[in-house]
C-alpha cells in the first residue's frame, strides 16, 4: 500500500467543520489526543466563541480551545461533520484551497454518481475494501454507520463471488445515530424501554452497500432485505445478516479470516459478539454461524467511531502515511 504523502517532522494540522454535534465531538476527542495531529480549529456557527469543553463536557481539563465561525485553509485536512446535504453546500459556498484534503462524514459523496465537487473527486473510505485507493486519495467520503457494519459482514462473501441468493439483514442502532437534535423518537421518554423499526427496506445506506458488493462481485443482482431498528441504548450497532452459503462453517471462517488477515480493526471472533466489546472503540467484531444452508454473520461496531469519526481518523492515518491504528487505541466499555 503506497502513499502519496511525505511525512515531515511537523504535525498534521486538522480542522473540524460542524464540531458541536455527536460526530464532531468524537472527532474533537480523537484529534485532541492524536500524537501526530495539531487540532488547528473547530468550526461551529451556532457555538462560535463558546468553549469546546462547555459543549463536549468530557473534555474539561483537556482543552481550552473555543469554537470559531471563521474558516481558514491553513490546514492539511478538514473533517466535515455536517448533516446530509450540507457538505456539498459547504464546499460550493466556501473557498477551500485545493491543497486541503477533505474527509466528509455525510452521505453527500459516497455514491459513484455523486462523488465529485468541483475539482475534488472523493474516494469511498472503507479501509477493509479500499485501503490502496485511500492511501493515494486527496478526498474521502466516509461510509455510513449501518453501511460499515453491514458491509464488513458481507465483503468476504462478495470478494469470493459467494453471494448467490438474497441477503436478509436486521440491525439495531443507538439513539446517537439520529444526531444531536432532539426528535420525537430520540427523547428519553419515547426511547427508554422501547424498540421500533424504521425505513424498512428503504434505508439510504442500501445504495452504498449495493455499490460495494457489486464492485467486488459484479454478478450479484439479488435483493438486500434490510430492517433497521431503533435500540434502547445510546451508541453502537449490532447487525445480523444471513444468506445461502453452500460451504461448511470451517470454510466460511477460513474465508473471513483470510479476507481480514491484514485488517487493523476488524476481527473474526470464535464466540458470539456483543456491543460492549466494541462501544467506545474503532473495532468491528464478527461472529459466524451455519444453520442448514444458511450462513449467519453478526457484526458489531460503535456507530460514532468505526461508523463515523473513528473511521475518518483511520482514513486520515492511511492518507498521511501514519500507522493505521495511531490515535485509535481505545478501551471498550466492557467491564
Image: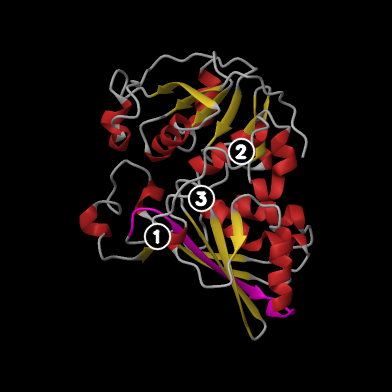
Left or right of residue 324: residue 19? left
Find the distance from the CA under tag 3 to the CA under tag 2. Answer: 15 Å
Q: For numbered disc 2, what is the local secondary structure? A: helix
Say whether residue 31 is left or right of residue 121: left
Specify the label residue 221 is tagged with. none
As drawn, 23 above or below 165: above
The quadrant holding residue 218 is: bottom right
Q: Is residue 97 left or right of residue 328?
A: right
Within 10 Å of the Cα at label 1, are there few (<14), some (14-19), or many (20+) other Cα atoms?
few
The residue at the point 64 percent across, 17 percent down is 98
Q: Quadrant of residue 100?
A: top right
| Nearest-to-viewer mark from 1 and 2 | 1
* Label 1 residue SS: loop
**Quadrant holding the N terminus:** top right
Q: CA distance from mark 1 to mark 3?
A: 21 Å
Q: Nearer the viewer, mark 3 or mark 2?
A: 2
Label 3: which residue?
145
Q: Secondary structure at mark 3?
A: helix
Q: Do we see residue 221 in this rendering?
A: no
Looking at the image, can residue 252 be seen? yes
Point out the stretch of residues depicted in magenta.
Answer: 233-249
- Which of the pair 251/240 is nearer the observer? 251
* First of labels 1, 2 by sequence position: 2
- Which residue does the numbered mark 2 point to in the structure image? 315
The residue beneath circle 1 is 334
Amino acid at each position: 500500500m503506497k502513499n502519496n504523502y511525505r511525512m515531515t517532522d511537523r504535525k498534521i494540522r486538522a480542522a473540524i467543520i460542524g464540531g458541536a454535534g455527536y460526530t464532531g465531538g468524537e472527532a474533537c476527542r480523537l484529534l485532541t489526543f492524536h500524537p501526530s495531529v495539531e487540532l488547528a480549529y473547530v468550526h461551529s456557527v451556532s457555538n462560535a466563541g463558546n468553549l469546546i469543553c462547555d459543549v463536549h463536557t468530557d473534555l474539561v481539563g483537556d482543552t481550552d480551545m473555543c469554537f470559531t465561525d471563521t474558516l481558514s485553509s491553513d490546514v492539511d485536512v478538514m473533517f466535515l461533520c455536517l448533516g446530509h446535504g450540507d457538505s456539498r453546500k459547504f464546499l460550493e459556498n466556501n473557498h477551500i484551497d485545493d491543497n486541503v484534503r477533505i474527509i466528509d462524514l455525510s452521505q453527500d459523496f459516497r455514491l459513484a454518481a455523486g462523488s465529485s465537487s468541483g475539482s475534488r473527486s472523493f474516494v469511498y473510505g472503507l479501509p477493509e475494501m479500499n485501503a490502496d485507493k485511500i492511501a493515494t486519495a486527496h478526498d474521502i467520503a466516509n461510509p455510513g454507520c449501518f453501511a460499515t457494519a453491514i458491509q464488513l459482514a458481507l465483503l468476504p462473501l462478495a470478494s469470493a463471488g459467494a453471494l448467490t441468493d438474497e441477503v436478509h439483514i436486521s440491525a439495531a442502532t443507538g439513539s446517537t445515530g439520529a444526531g444531536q437534535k432532539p426528535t420525537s423518537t430520540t427523547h428519553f421518554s419515547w426511547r427508554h424501554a422501547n424498540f421500533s423499526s424504521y425505513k424498512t427496506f428503504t434505508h439510504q445506506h442500501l445504495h452504498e452497500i449495493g455499490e460495494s458488493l457489486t464492485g467486488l462481485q459484479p454478478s450479484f443482482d439479488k435483493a438486500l432485505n434490510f430492517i433497521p431498528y431503533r435500540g434502547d441504548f445510546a451508541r453502537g450497532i449490532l447487525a445480523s445478516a444471513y444468506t445461502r452459503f453452500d460451504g461448511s462453517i470451517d470454510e466460511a471462517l477460513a474465508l473471513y479470516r483470510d479476507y481480514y488477515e491484514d485488517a487493523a480493526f476488524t476481527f473474526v471472533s470464535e464466540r458470539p459478539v456483543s456491543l460492549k466489546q466494541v462501544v467506545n472503540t474503532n473495532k468491528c467484531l464478527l461472529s459466524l454461524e451455519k444453520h442448514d444452508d444458511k450462513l449467519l454473520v453478526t457484526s458489531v461496531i460503535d456507530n460514532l467511531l468505526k461508523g463515523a469519526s473513528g473511521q475518518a481518523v483511520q482514513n486520515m492515518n492511511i492518507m498521511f502515511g501514519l500507522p493505521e491504528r495511531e490515535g485509535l487505541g481505545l478501551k471498550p466499555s466492557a467491564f
